[in-house]
Image: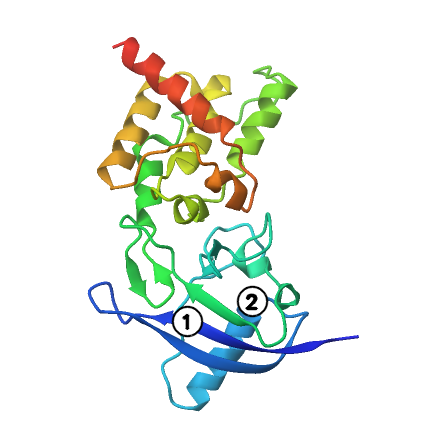
Amino acid sequence: MEKFINVTLRVWRQRGPKEKGQFVDYKMEKVSTDSSFFEMLDALNEKLVSQKQEPIVFDHDCREGICGTCSLYINGRPHGNDTAVTTCQLHMRRFSDGETIIVEPWRSTAFPVIRDLMVDRTAFEKIQQAGGYISVNTGGPRDANEIPISKIDADEAMDSASCIGCGACVAACKNASAMLFVSAKVSQFALLPQGKVEAKQRVKAMVAKMDELGFGNCTNTRACEVECPKSVSISNIARLNRELICAKLSD
């Protein structure tokens, strides 16, 4: 049987990166517990528009938990009070009737607020552009079995590549560190033969860009690993550090 709850949303409203923001309360009644958090926000925005008020701005795209676009800090946790899910996959059954739900944007100098709950995460794209790729000759595709790769390495590389770049690791970290994201992107290539050609250049360039953009340092609290919607392991950070040390020693 479908159930309904009443909740109060305490939402961060901010008109721009240089404007002062504040929390605003909104009452939502008869919210289906089967609806997703974004469906509930859609209903709220429809209500605001009908009342000739400004709708709440928030980021979303696929709503299938794979694009990494959604980025909300809900009740003190990135993506809310569920594990291994993005905000778009969070359902209202995770909340209680009469509960006050606090909704904020990611908090990081490197992710400035654009408006309301939307932040500018192009910093991640700049890090990726600094070295998160491999250079290959164009032409016909090579046979899949031409370069043998052990299953252990292939599986671990795929686990690292599962990072969707949502930024939850930064939001969860007390230092606003991007080490989990960067290490995942470095690891997915470091484990494969195709990525070893540019390995030294890649890790130095990506770490340098991360530092340049103002992300904090990692102090191994593991909050990033706990809140990551794809359960990316901090073992990638250890690999990143090894890759960086080896790259610098070889100069």
Identify the image quadrant of the C terminus: top left
Spot occupied by residue 236 in the image (x, y as percentages of width and height)? 48, 27
User: From the viewer's perspective, is the residue at label 2 or at label 1 nearer?
Assistant: 1
Colour basis: rainbow
Going by the picture, which residue comes out furthest to the left?
Answer: 18
Residue 228 visible in the picture: no
Q: What residue type is labelled 1?
A: Val
Q: In which quarter of the image is the N terminus?
A: bottom right
Callout 1 crowding tier (Cα within 10 Å): few <14, some 14–19, many ≥20: many
* Percent of width and height locating residue 182: 39, 34
Q: How far apart are marks 2 and 1 (CA)?
A: 13 Å
Indicate left or right for 212 with 64 as reference. Answer: left
Along the polypeptide, which appears first: circle 2 or circle 1?
1
Element assignment for label 1: strand
Residue 247 % position (x, y): 32, 15
Q: Say how many tags the image has.
A: 2
Residue indicated by mark 2: 37
Asked if residue 64 lies left or right of residue 71, the reply is right
- Numbered badge on residue 71: none
